[in-house]
Structure formats: C-alpha cells, structure tokens
Amino acid sequence: MPRKPTADNVQSLADLLEQLPEDLARQAFTHASWVEHRAESYERLAFLGDVVLSLAVSDHLFPRFERYGAGRLTKLRAQTVSGPSCARVALELGVPERLRAAAPAGTGRSFELLATSERVLASVCEAVIGACYLAFGTERVAPAVVAAFEGQIDDALEHPVDYKSLLQERLARRAEVVTYRIACEEGPAHDRRFVAIAEAEGHEIGRGEGKTKKAAEQEAAMQALEPRAAGD
C-alpha cells in the first residue's frame, strides 16, 4: 500500500503549480476565446480537475467526520467544492496574475472581465487541479488539494449555505436554469411528507423528500449537485 503523505511532506498546490510542465501550465491558463479549438483551452482540464477535487475532499471528509451521515457529508462537500470556494482558492493561487501573463496581446478590457469573473476563476482553479493530477498523480495532488481547501471546509462547517443556491450557481455556468415541482404528498396532515423534483432543460436532475416543500426542494438540489459534478 502506498505511504500516505504526512503534514511534513505534503506539497502545496501552489508548489505543484510551479512544477507543472510548460504545456499543461499553458493550457490551464488559456481561455477558449484565445484559441481556435476549445479543446486547447482550460475547459478539458477543468472537467478532470472537478472530479479530482470532489474525490480528494470526499476521501478527507469520510474518516474525519465519522458520525456524519451521507446527506450531511454530501452537503459539506458540495459547499466546499462550489464555484465560490474554487474562486477563492484561485485568488490564493494568483490566478488573475497568471491569466494576465497568458493573455494574448490586444485582449484589453475583455481580459479584465475574465480575470474578475467568479466562474472563470473557479474553472481555472479546477483546471490547475486537473493539470497537476495529470502531471503528478493522485498521491501527490490529493493532499495538496485538501490543504488548499481546508479553509473552505472550515467555512462550510461554520456557515452552511442554501443548496438550492449552490445548484443554481452551478447550472448558471452552463446557462441553464433549475425549476422545482412537488411530485407527491403523502401521510396525514400532522406527518406530511413531500417529494420534490429538480429539473433542468426538461430533465430530472434530482429528487428529494422532506416534511415541508422547502425541505424536499433542498434535498432535491443536494442530490442534483452529485451526478452533475463530474461534467461541470
């Protein structure tokens, strides 16, 4: 079994970023509007990095919070790896400055809009993680990711957020909108149970149950965050 890194030998995500091969580093900071083919931009790396981020955080949370059920762990992870959290880590990594250095001549004001966009910052953060994974593998990258997102985990524990808002923010990155409908109501008036369905583009993306309509919608949003994470 591979030796698990300790606090003394964990490299930071910033250190790994500095060690990236030139081609991966360049792609991680290349916006789709700067290249002829979108596959040459950071988008593919962000797709991969999103999965690596989710797995690294999950692997960290599972043994750390032994008394947490699957639902609570899912909520904690969802907030930790959300767009706003990734954007904050991006700022700590100096992503705006790196984007500025990578931007082609003449981008001007369009670059400034990109460098201040939470969506772009979050995607580049995921792209950096994806690039580091390709270059160094899980054993080196996962501990670095957890260390980089430790503050986001603490913030999620202290200030849990509305999961409907998290889902809305995630879907906005695809220019999609989520809607909710109550599929059924069961039980007597004093013990009513509601089933809510979250839908996007006419397709069901999450389903949840609760004692109130709002609680059921929250559970549906939480579930919807799961399968979509790998493709964001």
Image (cartoon, grey):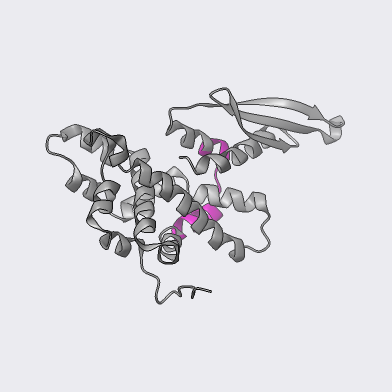
Question: Is residue 162 within the magenta segment?
Answer: yes
Residue 53 appears in the figure: yes
Q: Residue at x 17, y 48 (%)?
A: 101
Q: Which quarter of the image is occupied by the C terminus?
A: top left
Query: On the rendered structure, is 223 left or right of 173?
Result: right
Location of residue 149 with respect to 184 vertically, above or below: below
Task: Identify the residue at the far top of this view.
Answer: 202
Relative to the observer, which residue lies in front, 9 or 195?
9
Relative to the observer, which residue lies in front, 224 or 155?
224
Residue 116 appears in the figure: no
Q: In terms of secondary structure, what is the magenta stretch mainly?
A: helix
Question: Is residue 26 within the magenta segment?
Answer: no
Location of residue 107 with respect to 71 vertically, above or below: above
Location of residue 210 (image quadrant): top right
Query: On the rendered structure, is 93 left or right of 208?
Result: left
Location of residue 54 with respect to 205 vertically, above or below: below
Relative to the observer, which residue lies in front, 220 or 164?
220
Residue 218 coordinates in the image, percent (x, y) = 63, 37
Location of residue 120 (image quadrant): top left
Residue 52 coordinates in the image, percent (x, y) = 46, 54
Task: Identify the residue at the far left of this view.
Answer: 105
Q: Give the residues in magenta.
A: 150-166
Residue 51 coordinates in the image, percent (x, y) = 48, 49
Query: On the rendered structure, is 232 left or right of 124?
Result: right
Question: How many numbered marks appear?
Answer: 0
Q: Residue at x 23, y 33 (%)?
A: 36
Q: Residue at x 42, y 59 (%)?
A: 145
Query: On the rendered structure, is 47 left or right of 212?
Result: left
